[in-house]
Amino acid sequence: MNAAGLRSARQPFGLLLKQHPRAARTYSSTAVATPPTAGDGFVPDEQSHGLPGGIPSGVGIRGETTSYRLASGVVLSRPPMLTRSLTPFEESYYFYQRRLNQRLALPFTRYFYFKKGTAADTERKRKLKALVEGGQLWTGFGKTGWKDELMVGDESHRSDDNGYRRLVESSVTGEDGDSASFEAPLPRRTKADEVNDRRSLDRAGERTLYLLVKSKREKHAWRFPQAVLQGRETLVESAKRTLAEAAGVNMNTWFVGNVPIGHLVYEYEKGFQGDADKIGKKVFFMKARIMAGQADLKDNKLGLEDFLWLTKEEIGEVVDKSYWESVKPMLVAH
């Protein structure tokens, strides 16, 4: 057969698609969803893992995804509100830098601010002398300037109030020697921290908090909000709908990008009848941030009964071990 005969024997690509419609099925078209019951089984298989790169290879290919129900999950987080506390090494380093600066800096020109012989100058000298003799203040100039190192067990360089008490005790204003008044800084621990209120967003200010919800069932109750895709929804559209149906609309949230930060594959338990034509689920997690508001489970459509805002380590204490191993790579350490 000649070359012309070979060309004429080939069928157009469009005709092949008509003859084999399943070969043209895309990822989104496989998401024909019927909501599962609240007690769907959960048996993670070997493919369960967090995937930083997004959708795994094979999704949308004929044969594999037709056996799993597609779902979207929401990893909603509140970012840290405070800078983290210093480590012991960092505290020692900054203490050394502060003492070195005090050694090299010029003496404080007190007579520029306090007229010599006034009540304010006398009161300032009295306060500084009491602090130096009590070991609460060090100055690089004077008889005790050589004592610039900390003794073993000395914690005087640490302060739980960012130096507020020392500032009040050593400061005066005006020539009449009146004590200075300063607004006290807010504490790093809130009332929610003291009572360990895990439903509050005002706790663990140095850490990232994640929203977890609890379904009305005994096994695998705690997890991130998730629901199956409906119609031709994209993952982001489904995640936004899932969050609204799970935690209400009284939250100002922002979804970060259109690509999943990880995925989870699990099979239903043996004998599970909630989704007869599927053997399990593939859940793709979308990242989101909360800016304001609070979760509200009243009138939620997913059969949820409770919620918590937890740190990464606290999530591992609440969820099942298999679920924790799957979602752990998606969560930040701080």
Image (tube, rainbow, N blue to C red):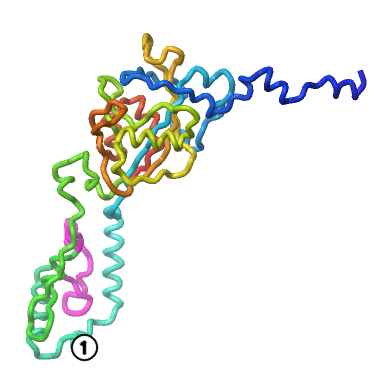
Compare residues 333 and 315 and report the one nearer the observer: 315
The residue that appears at 22% across and 48% down in the rendered structure is: 202
Q: In which quarter of the image is residue 282?
A: top left
Which quadrant: the N terminus?
top right
Residue type highlighted by circle 1: Phe
Compare residues 46 and 103 and report the one nearer the observer: 46
Q: In which quarter of the image is residue 60?
A: top right
**Image x and y of residue 68, in percent:** 47, 20
Question: Predominant secondary structure in magenta?
Answer: loop
**Image x and y of residue 126, in percent:** 8, 79
Segment tinted magenta in the rendering: 137-162
The residue that appears at 57% across and 18% down in the rendered structure is: 63
Would you say residue 151 is visible in this rendering?
A: no
Residue at the outermost right position = 2
The residue that appears at 17% across and 50% down in the rendered structure is: 190
Which quadrant: the C terminus?
top left
Residue at the outermost top position = 271
- Image vertical order of residue 28 relative to residue 211, above or below: above
- Image vertical order of residue 87 relative to residue 144, above or below: above
* Residue that numbered label 1 is attached to: 112
Q: Is residue 257 left or right of residue 216?
A: right
Compare residues 100 and 5 and report the one nearer the observer: 5
Check residue 158 for magenta coloring: yes
Q: How crowded is mark 1: few (under 14 residues within 10 Å), some or many (20 or more)?
A: few
Q: Quadrant of residue 15?
A: top right
Q: In this view, does 187 lie to the left or right of 80?
A: left
Query: Which type of secondary structure does the marked residue at label 1 adopt?
Result: helix
